[in-house]
Amino acid sequence: MKILGIIVLVAAFLITLALGAQNQIMVNFDYLIAQGEFQLSTLLGTAFGAGFVIGWVICGTLYLKARFAKNRLMKKVTKQQQELDQLRAKPIKE
């Protein structure tokens, strides 16, 4: 599964490079507070890079959140297992 992900990532990178090499046209780009003239390849590369970083940040945050929840639950399970073992060790008084 990791190999498939790496292949997809490399393919996307190569496609981006190919598009960037073919698009040397200067374009006007309006962003929130100003306007600028950029090469289309630079604009495509920046958009791809920003999307890649944002995706990794979101996935990383969700992964860490799930991992912390797992650790917290494992501690609860261990504590409950110890309590259960203590209850089983006590002799039954009749």
Image: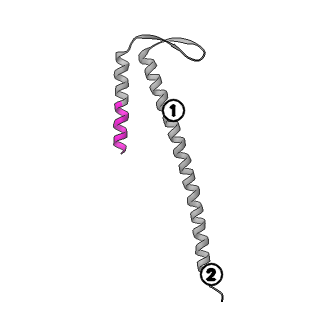
Q: Residue 33, image x and y in percent?
A: 60, 15
Q: CA distance from mark 2 to mark 1?
A: 55 Å
Residue assigned mark 1: 54
Q: Residue 5, image x and y in percent?
A: 37, 40
> Which element type, helix, strand or loop, lies under badge 1?
helix
| Residues rendered magenta in the picture | 1-11
Question: What is the quadrant of residue 26 in the picture?
Answer: top left
Mark 1 residue type? Ile
Give yes or no for residue 4 being in the magenta stretch: yes
Residue assigned mark 2: 90
Q: Main secondary structure of the magenta part?
A: helix
Q: Is residue 6 above or below residue 32?
A: below
Q: Is residue 61 above or below residue 75?
A: above
Mark 2: few/some/many CA within 10 Å (<14, 14-19, 20+) = few
> Which element type, helix, strand or loop, lies under badge 2?
loop
Mark 2 residue type? Lys
Q: Quadrant of the image for the C terminus?
A: bottom right
Q: Is residue 31 above or below residue 53?
A: above
Q: Quadrant of the image for the N terminus?
A: top left
